[in-house]
Image (cartoon, rainbow, N blue to C red):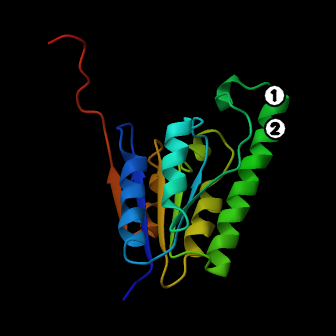
Amino acid sequence: MSRRYVHIFCGTGGGKTSAALGKGIREASKGRSVVMIQFLKEKQSGERMDFFKRLEPDVKLFRFERFPENFENLTDREKEDEVQNIKNGLNFAKKVLVTEECDVLILDEILGLTDKGIVSYDELRTLIEMVGDDTELYLTGTSRCEELWPYVDEVTELVTAYQSGGSG
């Protein structure tokens, strides 16, 4: 029996997306449907996109951003356009939750949208409150978003404890 479950993967360490996707793949192997929406994520190489395509229809990947450059490198006009694309992605996530189109929703790098002022904590809290009784929601990003912690079931913070300085 499934239950409502919300998990944040945050921090400066690597593996947040992999951890959330791993949870999604585990649930897909049980016959549950998974949707992943990526925000502010570097464009995937053809090889990585081919991998995601092989996971369909069990795991569906969506991206709403259109510019290949990092958000910080865009012109002001391009940033305005990209913010609208991101808001479209957020609205799609809300639609997926309301219509219960999937059993597992992964919002990859959504927490970083708070640092850029694109999405507020209130908007993310509202999104969390929309999670249905049999839905799992995973939110990832470098931002800790501690304001959201009281509204989620679990927080996993990944940190870089040691970074190699070269040859050893």
Residue 147 position (above or below residue 69): below
User: Residue 152: x and y, percent?
Assistant: 43, 67
Give the residue furthest to the left: 168
Give the residue furthest to the right: 77
> Is 55 in front, or is 40?
55
Q: Residue at x 47, y 51 (%)?
A: 140
Q: Residue at x 57, y 40 (%)?
A: 41
Residue 8 position (above or below residue 50): below
Q: Amino acid at mark 2?
A: Glu
- Crowding at dot 1, Cα within 10 Å, few <14 / some 14-19 / many 20+, comes out as few
Q: Which residue is mark 1?
A: 76
User: Residue 161: x and y, percent?
Assistant: 24, 32
Q: Give SS at disc 2.
A: helix
Q: Give SS at disc 1.
A: helix
Q: Residue at x 61, y 47 (%)?
A: 39
Left-right relation of 44 to 7:
right
Quarter of the image holding residue 121? bottom right
Q: Amino acid at mark 1?
A: Asp
User: Residue 44: x and y, percent?
Assistant: 56, 38
Contact flag, marks 2 and 1 (Cβ < 8 Å): yes
Left-right relation of 59 to 98:
left
> Is 52 in front, or is 127?
52
Q: Residue at x 44, y 53 (%)?
A: 146
Q: Which residue is mark 2?
A: 80
Give the residue furthest to the bottom: 1
Quarter of the image holding residue 3? bottom left
Q: Quadrant of the C terminus?
A: top left
Residue 143 position (above or below residue 105): above
- Crowding at dot 2, Cα within 10 Å, few <14 / some 14-19 / many 20+, comes out as few
Residue 144 position (above or below residue 56): above
